[in-house]
Amino acid sequence: MGQLVEHDILVIGSGAAGLTTALHLAPHAKVAVLSKGSLTAANTYYAQGGVAAVLDKGDSVEAHIADTLNAGAGLCHEDAVRFTVENGPSAIHWLVDQGVGFTTEMLPDGQEDFHLTKEGGHSHRRVIHAADATGFAISNALIDQVCQHPNVDIYESRVAIDLVTAKKRGSSDNQVLGAYVLNKETGNIDTHRARFVVLASGGASKTYLYTSNPDVATGDGIAMAWRAGCPVANMEFNQFHPTCLYHPDARSFLITEAVRGEGGYLRLPNGERFMHHFDERAELAPRDIVARAIDHEMKRLGVDCLYLDISHKPAEFIQSHFPTVYEKCLSLGIDITKEAIPIVPAAHYTCGGVITNKSGETAVKGLYCIGETAFTGLHGANRMASNSLLECLVYAISASKTIGERLTHSHPKIDIPQWDESQVTDSDEDVVISHNWDELRRFMWDYVGIVRTDKRLARALHRVELLQREISEYYSNYKVSNDLIELRNLVLVGELIIRSAQQRKESRGLHFTLDYPDQLLEAKDTVLAP
């Protein structure tokens, strides 16, 4: 039998967005943080590159805004971009105060300052980092702070199943009451009641066969918010990171953008460079251009991978700037100081998501979305490198301020029914889940990947609808499990991606279709409502 647990604020997700929210609200309320595994089970922990912010005197807010708008291919919301960029430096200083040890360098005048690197799409060095393991440093610092705070309750190995909502009598307003949560350790379904719920559960790149993301990136927050009545926007824009390590023993290992930022070359199997044929910025072009160029060359040559080469740089430079990449590759027999790294593009970032305002508020009262789960308008049709962690921090701080102001308002207590599994049985056909998961990820990769067509999208929609019927029947008759919850969410998000892609009759940013190769004059968001 599951438990009823009560909090002021329930934060679902333990990455930068969730932990930043928890730390800002903990002085004022009781906060619960749910994590699907340990607290490190989030994309933040694996982020290598860094956080983009205007920290150098030679840089400017206007330059960062212009670069972001340019990378977003006309779809960024300029007010959201300005809001994010203007609040970037203060968010970085807050991270420093939390104990994040960013990499520093000695300046010519003898002063020590933060080392800033440059990544694709940026016109200045503005990416602050901790060597090539920035997410690791941020995650550990925030976890240390959260674990010490008496007002934060941590629930690890928990999987949120669905939000609990209720409409007020005589009103059309929908209000969140909490969530049903699977305790993976006991197998019980607990009911978490909260005045405010914050979805900070990341993106949905596990919808695809090849991804840089950890296994937890199954679109849970997007799917739960959709089922609760929240509209989504721009789900067709899935960013494929151009350079993931191609090796049978290197599952989901990303080669940071900064390797190209510090002078790495992309090469064909014969050693030739090719990016200059696709964009004048060559290796420093935005990710959508680089990923499509690599995909084009792989298909043209019929090869499984291409190569990223930084071996022309001094060995000491490589080892000091990219220790994580160096050690990982060396463990697989690749010495990046002497040879090129085999790479392939992989699903990396969900640019669309649940529609929110600058405070992270959704269409459901009391429900907030932050980070990769949310659509704020910042990324447009293509996310610029290292703007994602920035978005997590800025919007978490903004949402926390709004929630903090509303904590003093009175909230009538509404009873939540306990989870009812009296009509279901244990499954003896779990092979159905693994088969459907594999089928989904393969046809999403083949039909809804880097290059799309109307025919491919139609095939994908037909298949996803068949899967949804199977999974709905399975969900109705058997006890839920971690794999079933994730598959149910992934199939729903897959449908949202496909339907959004079908609506966009043009090629823009990350959405490239052979049937509509040109970009329309007017840029419009793709909005879907439940």
Image (cartoon, rainbow, N blue to C red):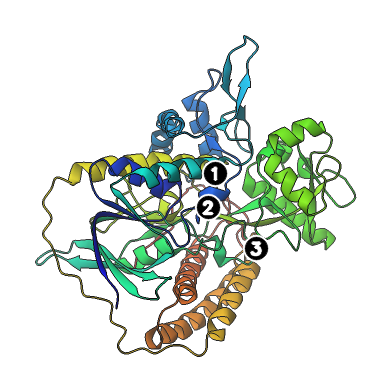
In this figure, which residue is indicated by the disc labeled 1? 135
Q: In this view of the protein, can residue 187 be seen by the observer?
A: yes
- Residue in the image at 50% along x and 64% along y: 218
Which residue is the extreme one toward the top? Answer: 109
Q: Are marks 2 and 3 in contact (CB under 8 Å)?
A: no
Q: Which mark is residue 43?
A: 2
Closer to viewer: mark 2 or mark 3 = 2
Looking at the image, residue 391 sits to the left or right of residue 174; the answer is right
Front-most of residues 137 and 313: 137
Q: Give the quarter of the image for residue 454.
A: bottom right
Q: Is residue 376 visible?
A: no
Q: Residue at x 51, y 62 (%)?
A: 216
Q: Secondary structure at mark 2?
A: helix
Name the residue rendered at 35%, 63% in the picture.
Answer: 225
The type of residue carrying mark 1 is Gly
Crowding at dot 3, Cα within 10 Å, few <14 / some 14-19 / many 20+, comes out as: many
In the rendered view of the protein, which quadrant contains the C terminus? bottom left
Specify few, some or many for label 1: CA neighbours under 10 Å numbering under 14, 14-19, or 20 or more: many
Instruction: Please count the marks in the image.
Output: 3
Residue 343 percent coordinates (x, y): 75, 53
| Callouts 1 and 2 close, C-beta under 8 Å | yes
Q: Tag 1 or tag 3, which sits nearer the N-term?
A: 1
Rounded to the nearest angstrom, the CA distance separating label 2 from label 3 is 15 Å
Q: Quadrant of the N terminus?
A: bottom left
Q: Earlier in the sequence, mark 1 or mark 2?
A: 2
Specify the amino acid type for callout 2: Asn
